[in-house]
Structures are given as structure tokens and as C-alpha cells.
Image (cartoon, rainbow, N blue to C red):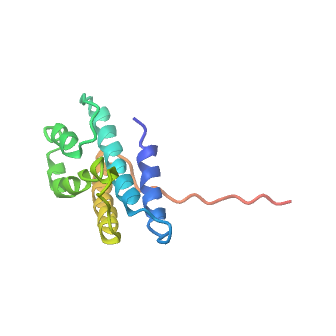
Amino acid sequence: MDTKSGRGLYRASLRLIKFEDALSYDTVCFHCQQCIEKYLKALLVLKGIEFQKKHDLTYLLNLLLSSEPTLEFIRNELDALNDYAIDIRYPGDFAMKDEAKTAIRYMKIARKIIREKLGLSKRKKSKKKHKTE
């Protein structure tokens, strides 16, 4: 599984929270959950652990605990993000700004730990080359 989709969702969530006027905080929370889901599934693939097509972070975490017991430390963050997989997309359920900020914080915590397990180091920002005319 490609971790680029997780990285893209991470960046999208950070960008979205900056545009408050036309912002759906629900979308920010959903993308935070999706980011972690993609990283957990990438780790499962790396470990050769089969999994069902579910959007449940707790389920994915439980599958990984036998080979990565230290992931237990992010259970609270994953449980909180889990609510944003499906429930938040139904009428009557919506997120507020503080929830979106918390979702981003939890996503960053979980993302850092899972990326380390995947052997992905912190990315260096690439320098853009400017063409001279």
C-alpha cells in the first residue's frame, strides 16, 4: 500500500483548517481519520497481516498489537479519530473548530509513531529549481 495517500490526506487536513469561512470542520476530521487508516493499513501490508475492508481504526490497531505492542500507546487517539470515519458524515452530526484542531493533534501523534514503524523518516523539503530564461 502506498503511503502517499496518507501523506496527502495529512496535508489536506492542515490546509483545510486554515480556510475558516468556507470550511467544513467535518471534512478536516474525516481526513484526519482517513490519514491514519491509510498508514495503519500500510503497516499491516508491510507486516503481511491480512485485514477486512473496514474503516475501524481500533480493529486495525488490534490486528497490529501482536507484532507492534507499543502501538497500544496511541489507542486513545485512534478511538477519538474513529468517530470521524462514518458517523460525522450523517445529518445531525457535525464537528466544531476545536474538534478539528484536536483531530489534527491526534492525527499528528499517531502519524509520527506509525511512520516510524514503517521506516519512513521525516521528509526533507525539496528545493524548487527555478528555470532561467
Percent x, y for residue 133?
86, 59
Q: Nearer the viewer, residue 53 or 126?
A: 53
- Residue located at (46% from left, 44% from top): 4
Foreground of the two, 54 or 45: 54
Question: Toward which corner of the image does residue 39 lie, by quadrant?
Answer: top left
Please, which residue is most extreme toward the front here? 91
Above or below residue 10? Residue 18 is below
In depth, the one of 56 and 93 nearer the eye is: 93
- Residue 70: image location, x then y, percent: 16, 50
- x 24%, y 30%: residue: 49
Quarter of the figure that contains the N terminus: top left
Quadrant of the image occupied by residue 10: bottom left
Against 44, residue 129 (above or below) is below
Depicted 61 relative to depicted 104: above or below: above
Who is closer to the viewer here, 69 or 19?
A: 19
> Please, which residue is most extreme toward the right here?
133
Question: From the viewer's perspective, is 18 left or right of 117?
Answer: right
Answer with left or right where residue 9 lies relative to residue 78: right
The percent position of residue 115, horizontal first and vertical second, equals: 34, 50
Seen at 53% across and 60% down, the residue is: 125
How many marks on residues?
Answer: 0
Residue 116: horizontal and vertical position, in percent? 31, 51
Residue sitting at 29 percent across and 32 percent down?
53
